[in-house]
Image (cartoon, rainbow, N blue to C red):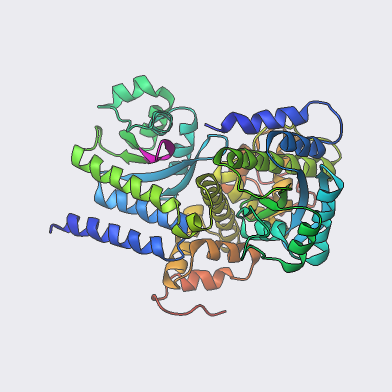
Amino acid sequence: MTSREQLLASTFVSLADTLVADFDIVDFLHTLATRSVELLDADAAGIMLADQRGALRLMASSAEEARLLELYELQNNQGPCLDCFRSGRPVARDDLPAMRTSWPAFTDQLQGFGFHSAQALPMRLRAETVGALNLFRLKPGRLTDADLSIGQAMADVATVGLIQERAIATGEQLATQLQTALNSRVQLEQAKGVLAQRAGLHMDEAFQVMRAYARGHNRRLSDVAAQIIDGTLDDDHVRKGSRTRPGVPPRT
Amino acid sequence: MRGPRVTEILSTIAESGEGTPPARLCAECLAALPVSGVAVALMTADGPSGVVLAATDGRARQLEELQFALGEGPCAAASGSGRPVLQPDLTAVGSARWSRFDAAALAAGVRAIFAFPLRVGAIRVGVLDLYRDTAGPLTDLDLADALAFAEAATVMVLHLQDHDEHGAANAALDGPIDSQAVVHQATGMLTIQLGIGLDEALLRLRAYAYATGQTVSVVAADVVDRRLSFDDNESGATGQGWS
């Protein structure tokens, strides 16, 4: 196998692992977004889900810089993610002029952030489109067909990941899953704010610290976020803990 | 898209009519869904607050108050976990989760309970409880509608809190909860700046936006970018450190 095939195989194996474990949806989608960038010819990737109002909301991004997050949110007005969600089909344009024709304001912002291409792949469950995988490139142009197939497979896995086996067994339906997932993301943003203020960090740094701590201590990202909010996990500990090796138990 | 439904519910209950907005929301919910009773109760981080905002009937109100008295029941579980608690048949084997509450509900003639948490991230705003005299699950469509009512109820309770805290209605009851990440980040920052909980921090952020005629997300962005801080003045309603 090439190294890319190996990475692809390991990605799907690790995703299968998270499906059976008591996994964390935000963390899971973050892994998918990060792997999308590693596996595809893309420089940033984000996963957006539609809320009860049909507004697209970011669940995970390969990077958490504020400017990048704005670029996702902008697409509630125009952009490939919105078109993809509405049509349920992949959306891409050949070049910047074509993008500008379709999404003038979005394309201006995109270029302002240094990107020259944006496209979106649908996240579908049966007949319903629940969101989209957004891919940004520094270079202009579309992804290759091979990349698109892999990207769509990852979007499909992400959608399956939303529907936990345990939840189906207890009769929980898709709408409930989506609402719970979106609320987890809101809680994560609140925790980022708490940690950023307490520790004097930028929002993206606060996210990295929380995620590294959760990884290093085998904890769910949502649980770490909840503990940061209720003050039972202090920020010194999280910051130091985020640099310890995996397997070291938390000092509580 | 289910989007227009939440807006539709909010505009219906914002129109002048009989009763308070919470009472109108419960009545609308009762009319729209195949249930026998509806109630909205306020929650705190510790569980039920004992405050029932509205209920369509005496039994629904009593069941809310009973959950507070017993310290157990579907509403506390839904609010705590952030997930709806759906009990389509209280008599089904293995469905009894809260022995005292379930027994009281059955004695009152209730066969099914569906409890929906009203939450903004970690903020526990309240719970929307649906009661039914007959067993059976909600259909997908009914569930989607119930979730829309739950979101409308969340928006409504937040607006009512604005009203209570600051003496006047700060905004019309039609806007959605701000979904931008920056609003929730700023809320988290304010808890540390002011030494208060997330729920109060969100109110302070919204109150400042209304008082200064800005959108909540613009104020939130100033907080996140450290252009505005709430900790260097008493009221928190006059920002300092503008650059």
**Viewer-proximal residue among A239 and A181:** A181
Q: Is residue B11 above or below residue A113?
A: above
Measured as percent of width and height from the top left, residue A184 is found at: 55, 54
Measured as percent of width and height from the top left, residue B212 is found at: 73, 35
Residue A189 left/right relative to B110: left
**Viewer-proximal residue among B181 and A112:** B181
Q: Is residue B72 above or below residue A145?
A: below
- Does the magenta segment cover residue A129? yes
Q: How many marks?
A: 0
Measured as percent of width and height from the top left, residue A238 is found at: 52, 70
Residue A65 shows up from this direction: no
Find the magenta span and give its range. A122-133
Q: Is residue A40 above or below residue B141?
A: below
Residue B152 left/right relative to B20: left
Measured as percent of width and height from the top left, residue B149 is found at: 67, 39
Where residue A230 sits, quadrant-wise, is bottom right
Residue A221 left/right relative to B143: left
What's the residue at 54%, 55% (across, down)?
Answer: A188
What's the residue at 45%, 38% (across, down)?
Answer: A72
What's the residue at 34%, 50% (across, down)?
Answer: A157
Is most of the magenta stretch helix, strand or loop? strand
**Viewer-proximal residue among A178 and A213:** A178
